[in-house]
Image (cartoon, rainbow, N blue to C red):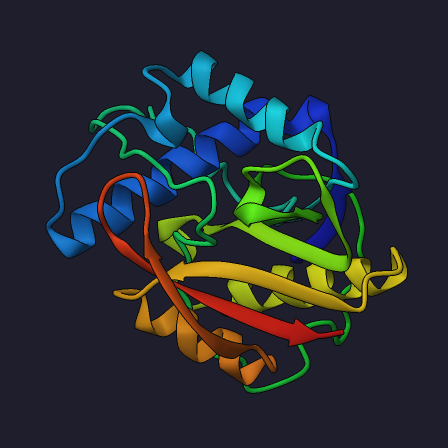
Amino acid sequence: MLTTRVGGPADAPAVARLWTVANVARQAHLGLPLGPVAGAASLPAAEDRVRERLAGPGAVLILAADPLAADPLAADPLAADPLAADPLAADPLEDDPLEDDPLEDDPFEDGGEPVAMALVVQALALDGASTEPLPGLAHVSMVAVHPDRWGRHLGGVVMARAQLEARHAGYTRAQLWTHETNHRAQRLYERLGWTPSGRTTLDERGERIRHYTLDL
């Protein structure tokens, strides 16, 4: 049974593995060159990057897992060269919009290797280049679903929980960035109430990303 929970620093190795395999699959799916995960040259370095993000102001990590399922990350996630992940973008999410309430019958229990995730942090000015917080604004990033679970609505599950946790933390608005090539993610976000702000930019690999906002 799929469950969701709030993660923490101890989950950094599993999060780095999931982030790696999801990034590799997204780039391979699009026929794009592969590179280091999360801007790191190795999985241990990627774990360090994950820990840095988890140490961010107001960080809340949402994980979805199936405690009874076989470990989807048992294979070496670096068998293919992983790609560099943009620190702003909410990809790699490749999931279809939900038909039902993603939180219905979800007990939020612990256990299992994560198969989907999302991170909520305090948004900072200048798209994170400043240390000045933007009051009331949450930033959602690191939204990822294991490629073996694409099409099973797990992106919607972690996003709905992320939005709930952001509201409980006192945020009134949220933002995220997603790649313009990720049309499935855009459909999902829009179904969950997110709207494009009209802003776009290029990530560190030169891929164009689109900005979305949500009133919580």
Q: Point out residue 183 in the picture as x, y percentages from the top left corner.
A: 32, 73
Indicate whether 89 appears above or below 43. below
Q: Point out residue 51 in the picture as x, y percentages from the top left corner.
A: 62, 23
- The C terminus, quarter of image: bottom right
Which residue is located at x 41 percent, y 54 percent?
91
Q: Point out residue 127 in the picture as x, y percentages from the top left corner.
A: 54, 48
Indicate whether 171 appears above or below 92. below
Q: Point out residue 11 in the picture as x, y percentages from the top left corner.
A: 65, 28
156 sits left or right of 185 in the view: right
Q: How many marks?
A: 0
Which residue is located at x 20 percent, y 29 percent?
80
69 sits left or right of 187 in the view: right
Which residue is located at x 65 percent, y 44 percent?
67
Viewer-side residue, 165 vs 63: 165
137 sits left or right of 23 in the view: right
Viewer-side residue, 24 vs 206: 206
35 sits left or right of 17 in the view: left
Would residue 18 be seen by someone viewing this image from the given angle? yes
- The N terminus, quarter of image: bottom right
Q: Which quadrant holds residue 194? A: bottom right
Viewer-side residue, 193 vs 63: 193
Indicate whether 87 appears above or below 64. above
Which residue is located at x 70 percent, y 59 percent?
162
Would residue 115 be seen by someone viewing this image from the given angle? no
